[in-house]
Amino acid sequence: MGSRSNTNLAYIAGFLDGDGSLMLQLKKRKDGKSKMRFMCTICLYQDSRHEKPLNWMRKVLNIGYVSRRSDGISELRINGYEQVKKILTLLTPFIRFKKIQARAMLSAANLLTKNFRKQLTDSELRKMVEFMITIQNSNYVTKAKRSREELLSVLGLTP
């Protein structure tokens, strides 16, 4: 990649450090064998009056979508573990303040990508819970999240 590309990636990584979040969530699923699924998301936030930078970032990364929330905030969201893995691989060298979350999310995305269409083993599920807790503990949280014990219980990993 050229210096312009690296400059763009460094800018986007800085934006993620300041006005973004990395989310690894456990969601209920109605279809399939498993009743739960993991969801990886990168989200960048900006006041809707100034959403042009989000559109520029979407164009540079060639991924995601920009949407407006009812509270006047716009978001650039990148969903899916393969997509998140691709973008974090590009951004991680430039991330400074969310390095711990980025590494945990990248590890989770790698595990999910490796096991695409296969059920995770109990050991792999426990690793995913640890990645979730690492990200959760490093994030600014406005409401209480599930504890390690709750996550293990939801996944059926308690005695």
Image (cartoon, rainbow, N blue to C red):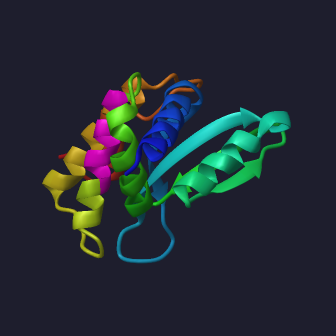
Which stretch is magenta? 99-109
In the rendered structure, the answer to whether residue 28 lies left or right of residue 158 reads right
Q: Residue furthest front?
A: 3
- 37 or 80, which is in the foreground? 80
**Residue at figure coordinates x 23%, y 67% from the top left:** 115
- 16 or 100, which is in the foreground? 16
- Residue 61 appears in the rendering: yes
- Residue 147 appears in the rendering: no
Q: Position of residue 29 (x, y in %)?
A: 48, 66
Instruction: Tell me if residue 139 comes above or below residue 84 in the rendering.
Output: above
- 4 or 102, which is in the foreground? 4
82 in magenta: no
In the rendered structure, the answer to whether residue 148 lies left or right of residue 22 reads left
Instruction: Tell me if residue 37 comes above or below residue 51 in the rendering.
Output: below
**Residue at figure coordinates x 41%, y 31% from the top left:** 136
Q: Position of residue 48 (x, y in %)?
A: 81, 38
**Residue at figure coordinates x 46%, y 34% from the top left:** 10
In the rendered structure, the answer to whether residue 130 lies left or right of residue 48 reads left
Q: Position of residue 109 (x, y in %)?
A: 32, 54
Q: Quadrant of residue 75?
A: top right
Number of callouts: 0
- 109 or 158, which is in the foreground? 109
Q: Residue furthest left?
A: 123
Q: Does the magenta stretch mainly form a helix, a strand or a loop?
A: helix
In the rendered structure, the answer to whether residue 30 lies left or right of residue 70 reads left
**Residue at figure coordinates x 70%, y 52% from the top left:** 66
